[in-house]
Image (tube, rainbow, N blue to C red):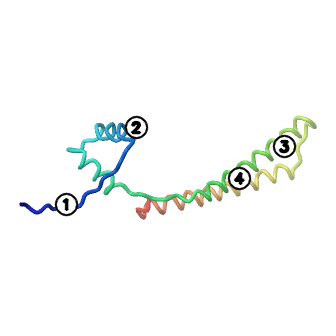
Amino acid sequence: MEKRTRPNQLKIRLSDKELAQVRQKYGQSRSKSMRHFVLKCILETSIYEVDMQPFRELQHLLSKTSTNVNQIAKKVNTYSLVYKEDIMTIQNEIHRLSKELNKLQNILYNRTNQGDI
């Protein structure tokens, strides 16, 4: 009997919905066989984990800024005037948000170029 080059086997169980999704994606691929498709998906696809904390912090900052903008808009609509310190507060927060966004963009850009993503 001939010795196999791939003697190991991996079995998985799928729900009907999962199996339908796998078959649909296999049908959309140009793979010669289901085995080829599965190996290509597993071995050629990078898997990475994204730390969502910076995004949560940015979301919090955005929420804070929009609250301040709403409070200032309410003052302007009520009293028909706006204080310079209110405008400065918004400008500072927008500047801070811009810096955070730039940091996130740089992190993602660097990781993408290093092949981490």
**Residue 65: mark:** none
Mark 1 residue element: loop
- What whole-number distance in Å separates the C-alpha atoms at marks 2 and 1? 29 Å
Separation (CA) of disc 3 from disc 1: 66 Å
Q: Is residue 111 placed above or below 35 in the rendered structure?
A: below
Name the residue: 27% across, 47% down. 37
Q: Of label 3 and label 1, which has the lower sequence position?
A: 1
Q: Which residue is mark 3?
A: 71
CA gap, disc 1 and disc 4: 51 Å
10 Å crowding of disc 4: few (<14), some (14-19), many (20+):
few
Q: Say whether marks 4 and 3 touch (CB < 8 Å).
A: no
Q: Which mark identifies residue 6?
A: 1
* Quadrant the N terminus occupies: bottom left
Dot in front, 2 or 3: 2
Per the rendering, the mark at residue 60 is: 4
Q: Which mark is residue 17?
A: 2
108 sits left or right of 28 in the view = right
Give above or below for 95 relative to 71. Answer: below
Tags 2 and 3 touching, CB below 8 Å: no
